[in-house]
Image: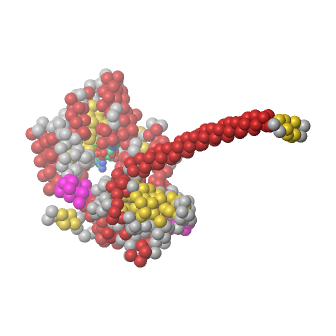
Amino acid sequence: MQNHTFGIWHVTNSTIIFFSTFGAVLLCGAAVFHLFAQNRMLRQRMGAIQDHTSDILRDLTHLRLCVENTSDGILLQDLKGRILWCNNAYCDIMKVLRSDIIGRNPLEFALPDNARLPPEVIEAFEYDKSDEQLKKLQLFRNQRGDGSLFWNQLSVAFQTGSDGRDYAILICRDVSTQVEREHYLEDLSGRLEHEATHDNLTGVPNRAAFLDFIETALKEDRDGSVGLLHVDLDNFKTINDTHGHSAGDAVLRHTAQTIRSSLRKSDLVARIGGDEFVVVCLGSESLDYLEAVGQRLLDALSTPLTWSDRSLLSEASIGAAQSEAGCMNAEDLLNKADFALYEAKRSGRGCIELYDAALHNRHAIEMQLAADLAEAIDTGAIDFWFQPIKNLWNDQIVGFETLARWVHPDTGRVYSPAEFLPVVEDIGLLGELDMISMLTALEKKASLAASGFPDMRMSFNASPELLAHPDFINRLIWAVEASNLDRHQITIEVLETNNFGDAAETSSQGAIIRDLKQAGFRVFLDDFGVGFAGLSHLATLDLSGVKIDRSLVSCILTDDVSFKIVRKAIELCNDLSIAIVAEGVEDETTAKTLQKMGCSLIQGYWVSRPLPASDVVPWLAEDSAPRVRIS
Ligand code: C2E
Ligand code: CA
Ligand code: CA
């Protein structure tokens, strides 16, 4: 046995052997343990790698699932645009085989035939990675393999691969349905916009578009160079009535075209009412310039239109006004052109009138008159006078007609209805005025009864505005009932020149006449003989009587034709048992002649001029012999 000394350790061989062996065992153990541990680590690592690999595989599977099953086409391209790979959806969208397109630039086959690029352009193609535009969604009209076209929405992204090369990833989507719907909606809104701003019949801009245009023009008007022509057809109603509405429509279309083709491109023509057109001339230097344009239009419109073998001529009247620099709105300018048009109509039609200084003065006076009249109607300052009607057979006064008079509050001048009624009509107050006339007539009728004249009849004039007033009949009946009046002694005079429509008995005014008659009132046709369709109205309207117009009556002694017409009219009315009153009888001979013709009722200066309300009872109470009074 050997002894060994290891430092402080003093050991024998056997001990060494023992320790060596023990050491070896320990070492082995440690090694085994180490191996074991390493193995475990390896296994753990392997597990992790396996997990990672299966994650990658799973991701790849998912990726593939997505890429292959998305409805969007996906392309992988190099920067020259050559296809390296594509998914099935791309082939489906493009209707191409994958094998046919790999290696090709879509520019070669995806553009429509008429938009194909030359080979050298395609050859030179290269994506510009810095082009921000490419990253946005873009829309292209593309062509499929079968030749059909579709809307392709594209987006491009650039990516550098693990090989260090740059690639373009292209996503395509067939958005034809959406784009076509969008186009349809755009088209529809365009059509709606056109319809909202254009006249259906003539195709020219309508009133709303005209107002828009002129407001803008006037806002930008620095030197008073906006000219406005208001064009109104003179005999449009006659064309409509004689040839029918289709002819009327043809005339309106023809007028619009004729005006349009007589103007410069920058001028506007619009239809703003039935037979009313306006023309806006930009850069109009003066009224003289407008006069020349207007004259050109009148000349062009004086050529008749041939329609269904008929020659239709509808000449026009024109009113022209020029803007004043920077201080005008459309309404002002239109008012002025309107007033000038009114003048053109007054001075014989078929001509152009300019709104110049003289017309401006007249306009100012009429506007003042209109304001004064509106106030007079509002404050009940219109007066009503009464003209008697006499029965020639018994020399008795049988009734009165109510006639409006207006005494101007400042000047004291008495205005006749002929002077102020057109203005009242223009400001839309004729219905109001007639309502006052009606109530005044009924009041007078009641006061006459109270003064000992209970059988006196009372007439009042009813304009179309009164007849159309929704309260007319109710208020009439209410007032008659309130004063306990006999309805049969109340006469409503309607003008023969009223528009009763083609079928008078079915028109709304015809219906009102029937209602009035049914309610027990008398309805007379006024001014008989001056309208066009007097006889036809006699046949169709259920009338109580007619009043023969003064223009016929006043010349029966001098004009044979008037004599014959009046005689026939009286004969006809007597045959039809319709009452007849001759108006405007100014002398005894005329009265006697009418009596011989069979007319019993007369009205006129020979009996009396219209009387102020306070003179009526004294006049009746006086000797009833015919006399002439001055009003
Ligand atoms: P009208 O209904 O035909 O009334 C008769 C007109 O002839 C009255 O004119 C009267 O003064 C006038 N006259 C009567 N006898 C003679 C005569 O012998 N010789 C001449 N030269 N004239 C005579 P006025 O009062 O000026 O009325 C004119 C027209 O105004 C009336 O004609 C009527 O249509 C209308 N009118 C009058 N007042 C009203 C009213 O309150 N409402 C409506 N809507 N119209 C009215
Ligand atoms: Ca009358
Ligand atoms: Ca009359």
Quadrant of the rendered image containing residue 321? bottom left
The N terminus, quarter of image: top right
Which residue is found at the position 41% from the left and 77% from the top?
120
Residue furthest toward the right? 8
In the rendered image, residue 509, in percent from the top left (x then y), is placed at 25, 39
Question: Looking at the picture, how far across and down is residue 161, in whole percent?
Answer: 53, 60
Question: Ligand 1, what quadrant?
Answer: top left
Q: Give coordinates of residue 430: x percent, y percent.
A: 37, 42
Residue sticking out furthest to the left:
575
The C terminus lies in quadrant: top left
Q: At 47% from the left edge and 69% from the top edge, which residue is drawn?
A: 80
Q: Nearer the viewer, residue 528 or 46?
A: 46
Name of the residue lying farthest toward the bottom: 120
Hey, which residue is sitting farthest front in the picture?
1
Residue 424 visible somewhere in the drawing: no
Looking at the rendered structure, the number of numbered marks drawn on it comes to 0
Horizontal side of 231 relative to 363 (left or right) equals: left
- Viewer-closest of 498 and 22: 22
Horizontal arrangement in the rendering, residue 158 relative to residue 190 (left or right): right
Residue at x 32% of width, y 28% of height: 474
Residue 153 to residue 104: above or below: above
Question: 248 or 167, which lies in front?
Answer: 167
Magenta segment includes 375: no
Scheme of colours in the image: secondary structure
- Name the spot of residue 112 as percent of width and height, x first: 33, 66
Residue 498 in view of the camera: yes
Q: Is residue 230 magenta?
A: yes
The residue lying at 85 percent from left, 40 percent from top is 4
Q: Is residue 505 left or right of residue 84?
A: left
Q: Which residues are magenta?
A: 221-250
